[in-house]
Image (cartoon, rainbow, N blue to C red):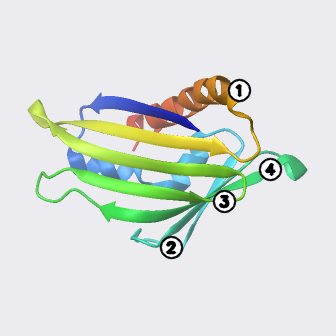
């Protein structure tokens, strides 16, 4: 299992940073070869199922995630979302937080515990490096554009 954390401080209000980082269909727009579906549709809440289908043809797999914590920011307070990975291939959890910073800025934290079923631990360094690169680029793109 790979554990990592990404952080960005952005010149956005809490609510806008939250909206951008939890816009699930946009995650599919910024991660190559990935399509994201959400059931039931908006608004997101505890129990919402987010499925990221990645790959091509027979080499595609689903990363099924259930929202288990959903606390949007309210009146300047931090926001937090936890997704538990429920798929057959991808294991672990993700946690997204938005925290107020001085000057109307927001710190966005993305924590991930990531595993791939049947992938030996010897590959964890490679998996971690690839995941940090992919999720880091996704995070940058999600926060950069409305």
Q: Quadrant of the N terminus?
A: top right
Of tags 2 and 1, the one toward the viewer is 1
At mark 4, the secondary structure is loop
Of tags 4 and 3, the one toward the viewer is 3
At mark 2, the secondary structure is loop
* Residue 117 position in % (x across, y down): 72, 48
Front-most of 98 and 85? 85
Question: Which residue carries the number 3 mark?
Answer: 87
How dense is the environment of label 3, judged by Cα within 10 Å: few (below 14), some, or many (20 and up)? some
Ranked by sequence position, the earlier of labels 3 and 2 is: 2
* Residue 120 position in % (x across, y down): 74, 35
Q: Tell me the tag on residue 122.
A: 1
Q: Quadrant of the C terminus?
A: top left
Measured Cα–Cα span from mark 4 to mark 3: 13 Å
Q: Is residue 49 above or below residue 129?
A: below
Question: Which residue carries the number 2 mark?
Answer: 41
């Amino acid at each position: 299992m790979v554990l990592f954390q990404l952080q960005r401080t952005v010149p956005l209000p809490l609510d806008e940073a939250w909206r951008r980082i939890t816009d699930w269909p946009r995650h599919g727009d910024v991660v190559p070869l990935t399509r994201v579906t959400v059931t039931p549709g908006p608004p997101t809440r505890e129990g919402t199922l987010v499925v990221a289908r990645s790959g091509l043809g027979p080499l595609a797999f689903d990363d099924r995630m259930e929202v288990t914590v959903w606390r949007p920011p309210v009146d300047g307070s931090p926001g937090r979302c936890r997704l538990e990975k429920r798929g057959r291939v991808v294991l672990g959890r993700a946690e997204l937080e938005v925290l107020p910073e001085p000057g109307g800025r927001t710190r966005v934290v993305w924590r991930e515990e990531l595993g791939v079923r049947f992938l030996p631990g010897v590959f964890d360094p490679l998996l971690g490096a690839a995941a940090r690169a992919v999720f880091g680029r996704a995070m940058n793109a999600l926060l950069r554009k409305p």
